[in-house]
Image (cartoon, grey):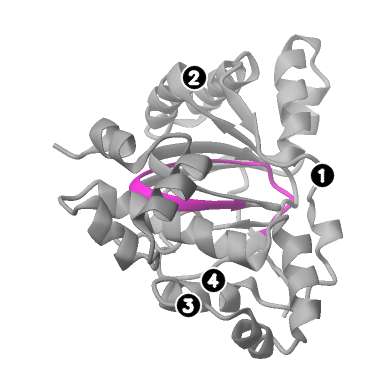
Amino acid sequence: MKIEKEIIPFENEESFKIHTPCFKNYFFWHYHPEIELVYVEAINGISHVGKHISGFVESYLVLIGPNIPHLNFDYGIETEYRQIVVQLKEDFPKNTILSTPEFAPVKKLLERSCFGLSFKGETKEKAVEKLKAVKIMKSFDALMGLIEVLYILAESTEVEQLNDEDTSVKFFLNDKVRMGNVYSYIHENYDKNPDVNTVAEMVHLSTSAFCRYFKKQTDMTFTDFVNQYRINQAKTLLLCDVSISEIAYHVGFESISYFNKLFKNLVGETPTDFKKKNKLN
């Protein structure tokens, strides 16, 4: 019942692995000692890294440090998507980067990865363009390309630190409750009235104990998590030809004004502005 440790296989001559896994129908709350860089293109998705939870639209680029629990970024995506995952062999930073003075900016980047880092703007565009090229390169050229990607990220100011503290698995090892049960319950009931007492009973905790557990795991209350999940679902619908009032009711809000207010608080813009800026052609 503990968080799952992923065992990542590497070929004998590989110092890093780049691939395109697909787990969208599988809740994979896991960790591994390898540093990981993930890029996802999708209409909408969920990011859960350490204690940080948020939604993303169109694309997402994130660097995750060693042993940081995270959810697979394609979890629950119901539309077409693309994903590139890079995993650095556990001894790769020490043997290749940490011992080389010229790699000082990259060293600092990898040290900060323990908080989880997401990248935006031109940084994301440049890094992803190079990353897509690396994916089809061979051996030495691929390694040099990956170093370039890391330098792009290391020199960027277009970065968001996802956690305020190290959230590596040592802080989660005593977790006996499957977050997957919580996600599944919310996904099935977010448009109704999710009951914290029901989900607490599902995971065999008292309501008060569950609330403490959930806040420790996510830095959010259960109600805040449900509302954020609803808003994340609303983003997908806003990209389609559905009215805002219909969307508000569809994701479980009885008050359109409250939906608009909460959406702006969480997303930083109104549903109308979001729809205009991101509407699919």
Q: Do callouts 1 and 2 mark residues in contact (Cβ within 8 Å)?
A: no
Q: Do callouts 4 and 1 mark residues in contact (Cβ within 8 Å)?
A: no
Amino acid type, label 3: Asn
Taking the spot 72% from the left edge, 78% from the top edge, the residue there is 177
Q: Position of residue 2 (x, y in %)?
A: 74, 75
Of the numbered discs 4 and 1, the one sitting upstream in the chain is: 1
Q: CA distance from mark 3 to mark 1?
A: 34 Å
- Identify the secondary structure beneath mark 1: loop
Of the numbered discs 4 and 3, the one sitting upstream in the chain is: 4
Taking the spot 70% from the left edge, 53% from the top edge, the residue there is 51
Whether residue 14 can be seen here: no
Look at mark 4 in the image and give the residue it sits on: 183
Amino acid type, label 2: Thr
Q: Position of residue 77 (x, y in %)?
A: 36, 59
Residue 12 in the figure: left or right of residue 259: right
Q: Residue 216, relative to residue 157: is it above or below?
A: below
Q: Which mark is residue 123?
A: 2
Give the crowd class for mark 2: few <14, some 14-19, many >=20 residues within 10 Å: many
- Identify the secondary structure beneath mark 4: helix
Of the numbered discs 3 and 2, the one sitting upstream in the chain is: 2
Q: Do callouts 3 and 2 mark residues in contact (Cβ within 8 Å)?
A: no
Indicate the quadrant where residue 101 lies.
Answer: top right
Give the crowd class for mark 3: few <14, some 14-19, many >=20 residues within 10 Å: few
Q: Which mark is residue 166?
A: 1
| Magenta span of residues | 31-48
Q: Nearer the viewer, residue 52 or 277?
A: 277
